[in-house]
Image: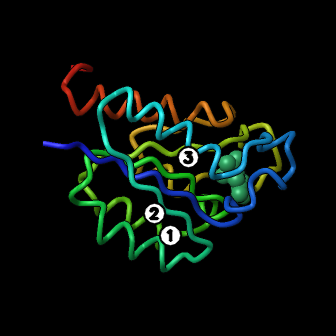
Amino acid sequence: MVMTYLIINGPNLNALGQRNPSHYGRLTLAQLQERVQQRATELGVEVAFCQSNHEGALVDYLQQHGPAAQGIIINPGAFTHYSIALRDALADLATPIVEVHLSNIQAREEFRRRSVTGEAARGIISGLGWHGYILALEHLVRLSKGELE
Ligand code: DQA
């Protein structure tokens, strides 16, 4: 069975590379996804990428593809801090979820410290830049293989 992991990015993450590099690094989203794809190939798993600036589109994608996936990596962007709809869509899934942030959301403005979506995730990786996505994938793959019991 091929194991598929969803890599979902929310609003403004399509603009990576142009956004404040001290928070978000210099890679474009395409370059970040290429690195995740490379690691997925090494691990022998499939990844499917989705980016949307629209809350409803992210909910639709999660409802459609979340149940069959082995794991979900999501950076909900600013929706992290206030989207109950996205949080509910994540909480409705039995699929394991890791939330990733490029920047350390604890070390920025007060309003970024709370993650409502993260409450529906297994865990959160924040502040490790693009490498957080790789660590999240490695974690979910090992989890699926039963290596973390
Ligand atoms: C972000 C952090 C959010 O607060 C912000 O709105 C983003 C990106 C991150 O990856 O660090 O768009 O999720």
Picture coordinates of residue 31 (x, y %)? Answer: 65, 45
Front-most of 120 and 131?
A: 131
Q: Which residue is the site of mark 3?
A: 33
**Disc 1 to disc 2, how far (Cα)?**
5 Å
Query: Label 3 amino acid?
Result: Gln
Q: Residues within 10 Å of mark 2 (few under 14, many from 20)?
A: many
**Disc 2 to disc 3, how far (Cα)?**
23 Å
Helix or strand or loop: what does disc 2 sit on?
helix
* Residue 113 visible in this rendered orientation of the protein: no
Of marks 1 and 3, the one in the foreground: 3
111 vs 71, left or right, is: right
Q: Residues within 10 Å of mark 1 (few under 14, many from 20)?
A: few
Picture coordinates of residue 37 (x, y %)? Answer: 47, 40
25 vs 122, left or right, is: right
Front-most of 17 and 110?
A: 17
Q: Earlier in the sequence, mark 2 or mark 3?
A: 3
Q: Could you tell me if the residues under marks 1 and 2 are in contact, i.e. CB atoms within 8 Å? A: yes
Classify 113 as above or below 104.
Answer: below
Picture coordinates of residue 32 (x, y %)? Answer: 62, 43
Q: Which residue is the site of mark 2?
A: 87
Query: Label 1 amino acid?
Result: Ile
85 vs 63, left or right, is: right
35 vs 102, left or right, is: left
At 83% from the left edge and 49% from the top edge, which residue is drawn? 109
Query: Label 2 amino acid?
Result: Arg
Quadrant occupied by the C terminus: top left
**Disc 1 to disc 3, how far (Cα)?**
27 Å
At 64% from the left edge and 60% from the top edge, which residue is drawn? 81
Helix or strand or loop: what does disc 3 sit on?
helix
Q: Which residue is the site of mark 1?
A: 84
**Looking at the rendering, which quadrant does residue 89 occupy?**
bottom left
